[in-house]
Amino acid sequence: MTNTFVSSIEAVNAAIQNYNPFTNDGIVKEQDVWGKGFPDVATLNAHASNKVFEAIKFVRTSQSSQDKLTSIAITAQKGVGKTHLLSRIRHQLEKEGGALFVYAGGNNYTDLNLVKYQFQQTLADSLSKTGSQKVMQWQEVATAMVNEVKTDNFSTPAELVKRFDQAYIDSLAKNKNLVSVLQRQVIKNKPYADPYILRAILWTLSETQAPFAIKYLSGEQLAQVNADELGLPNLSKTNQDREAEALKNIQQILNLVSFYNPVVICFDEIDVINNSTDDGLPTASIIANFVKIIHDTLENSELSQGIVILTVMLSETWRDKVNSMPGGTPDRISKYTQRKPLDLNNVSGDSMVQLVTVWLKEFYRLKNLVPPHPLYPFEESKLREYGKVSKPSVREALRWCADNFKIVQEALPSDPFERFTLAFQRESKADIGDYLENSDLISEALYFGFVTLKGQTLEEVIIEEVTNDVQPKTYHINYINFKIVGNKNRKEVKIGVAVIQSSQVTLTAGLKWLIDYERYDLTRGCLVRSESKIKQMKNHSSAYKLLNELKFARGGKHVDLIEEEIRPLVALLAVYQKRRNYQLTEEEIFDIISKNKITFNNLLLREILSEPSGNMPQINEDEEDKELITVLLDIPTSPPIRSETDDSDDDINKL
C-alpha cells in the first residue's frame, strides 16, 4: 500500500499563518545575484535570457576579432524582473559554466567622476566570487594559465589552490620563486600582457596571498610588506591617478581573462540617481558612454573567447536618454540586437501560475510540508484571471500574493452532529500514507476508542479504566501500548494491548512483555498484528514460540488488524485531535460517539475484549444504527468476517 504523503491541513495552515513568503515583494539585490537567489520561473522572459546565452555562444565561436565583443540592452518597467533576469543568468553560469560573470550595479558608482576606477574595483570583486568550478573566478583563470604551461598533467582549480602554497614554499627552498617561473612561462604566450597584472592573477591561487593580489587588481594600494612578498609595484596614487590608469588596467584584465573564458558584464540599474559628474551628466549617460568606451578600445583577438556586455535600464531611460545619445552610443550598447533593446514582459495568466508554484514549492520545502495541492491556499483559476486581466509586474504579482496568502475559514454547519459527520467523512477519506505500518498511530486510535467506552459494558466486560502508563518502562520503550482495566463477572480484568507491525526483533521483545503478567500487572495479553505478518513467522523462531506461549500457556490472544475496522478509529482520533478546526468540543464528540454506538459496535475493539475463544463476537444493531454507521464510515453495511489465526620545469609540474 503506497500513497503520496500529504501533510495534515492543520500543519500546513499553521505554517501559512506563521510566515508569508511573499512579503519581500521579490526585490532582487546585488547579494541575491551572487547568493542563493529567489525562486525562478524559467519560462518568464526566457526570450531575454535565451538571447544572452545565444550571444555568449556567438562571441565564443566567432572567427572574427570584430565579433568578439557584443552587447545587449535590456529594458523594462520597475518591478518586472530586470535584476532577477541577471540573477537567473548568473546562477545558470555558476551551475553549468560557459562564461565568467561580472555584475556592476549602478549603486556602486557613488562618484561618477571616478567611474572607470570604480568599475575596475567591481571587476576585481566580481571575479573573486565563486564560479562554476567551486573556486573564485580569478582562480579559474589562473588555473588555465598554469595548465597552459605545464607539460605533464592537467590540474583542476581546486587541486591547484590546495597545493599552491606548499609548492611555492618548496620552490623557495631551492632558491627559486614559483610565481616568477610561472610568470615567465605564461608571458611567452601573452607578450602584450601587463606582467604585473598577470603575476597578480597567478597569486590568486595562493590561499594566503589571494586577498592582497585581488586588492592590487582592484587598483588599491598595498602595504609595502605585502607588495614586496608578491613582487608587485606599489606606488602611492591619488584617486585621480587611479581613474587615469583604470581604463588601461580594465583592458588588460579583460583581454587576459577573456582569452580563457567568455566574460558577461552586466551594468544594472544605470538609471539610479547618483551624484552627477562635474559636467552635470546623470548616471545613465555616464554608464552608457563608458560601455561605448569599452567597446571601442578593447583590442580583441580572434583567439579570445569573447565578451558580452548587458546594460539594464528602465524603458523610459532608453527612450528618453540613451537612444538619443550621439556618436553611435546606442548601436554599441545594443550591438547584438541591432540597436533594438530586449524588452521584458509582464506576468501573464500562465506565468502567474508558474510564479506562485515555484515560490510555494520553496516555501513548503523549507517547512518540510506537502500541501493538498501545489498552489494551496490559492486557486489556479483566480491566479490565471488576475494575471490575464491585470498583467502585473513580478513585484506587483508578489504583492498581490502577499495580500492573499491566507486561509479562508470554512463555513461549517450549525448543528454539532452535522459538523461531526462532515469531519468524520473528511478524515475517513484523508490520505494518511501507509498507516497500517504505523504501530504508534494504530495504538493511539485503539486507545482513544476504548477511552470513549469507559463505564460501558462490552463483551461482558465493564470498562473501568484505560491507561497507557504500563510500568516498568525500559530505556523509554514501552512495548505494551496501553492497559484496559475492568470487571467481568465480578472478577478483575487487566488486558495489556501491544500493537506491533514492525520487525521480528520488536515483535520478540514485545511478546516477552506481554507474557510477563506478574511484572506488568496483567490478567491477559493481546497482540494486535496483521495476520499476513503472523503467517510469515518461522516455526522455529523465538517470536513464534512466544506467541504460542501467550495464546496457549498464558491465556492471551492475537487479534488480526483489519483495515475496515481500524480505519474508522483512526478517523475518530483525527476528528478529536482537530476538534477546534471543526468547532467541536470534547463533550460533543464523546456524546455523539456514545449515543450512536460508533466505538461500541467496532469489531476490532470487541475482539480485543472478547475471551480468546476464537468465536466471532455477535453484534445486535437495529436498522437505525446500521444506517448511521454506513453514513458515517462510508462503508458497506455487512461487516467483514474475521478468520482465525494460523500458526614545465620541475617546480611547475609539481603543481
Image (cartoon, rainbow, N blue to C red):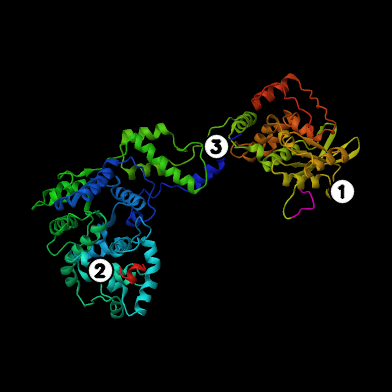
Amino acid type, label 1: Glu
Q: Is residue 321 visible?
A: no
Compute the Cα span from label 1 to label 3.
44 Å
Is the residue 69 above or below the residue 158 in the image?
above
In this view, which residue lies farthest toward the left? Answer: 327
* Residue 242 picture quarter: bottom left
Residue where numbered disc 1 is placed: 518
Where is residue 499 drawn, in percent x and y?
A: 73, 41
Instruction: Compare marks 3 and 2 and give the one earlier in the sequence.
Output: 3
Instruction: Kindly report which numbered mark, 3 or 2, lies closer to the viewer in this rendering.
Output: 2
Q: Position of residue 73 (x, y in %)?
A: 20, 48
| Camera-nearest label, 1 or 2 | 2
Residue type at mark 2?
Gln
Q: Earlier in the sequence, mark 1 or mark 3?
A: 3
Which residue position is annotated with label 2? 185
Residue highlighted by disc 3: 4
Q: Amino acid at mark 3?
A: Thr
The quadrant in which the N terminus is found is: top right
Labels 1 and 3 touching (C-beta < 8 A): no
Nearer to us in this view, 265 or 169? 169
Q: Residue furthest top?
A: 623
Which image quadrant for residue 457? top right
Question: What is the span of residues highlighted in magenta in the rendered image?
Answer: 469-474
Q: Is residue 530 magenta?
A: no
User: Which circle's residue, 1 or 2, is located before the other in the chain?
Assistant: 2
The answer to whether residue 302 is visible is yes
> Closer to the camera, 334 or 576?
334
Give the residue drawn at x 76%, y 22%: 621
Q: Quadrant of residue 275?
A: bottom left
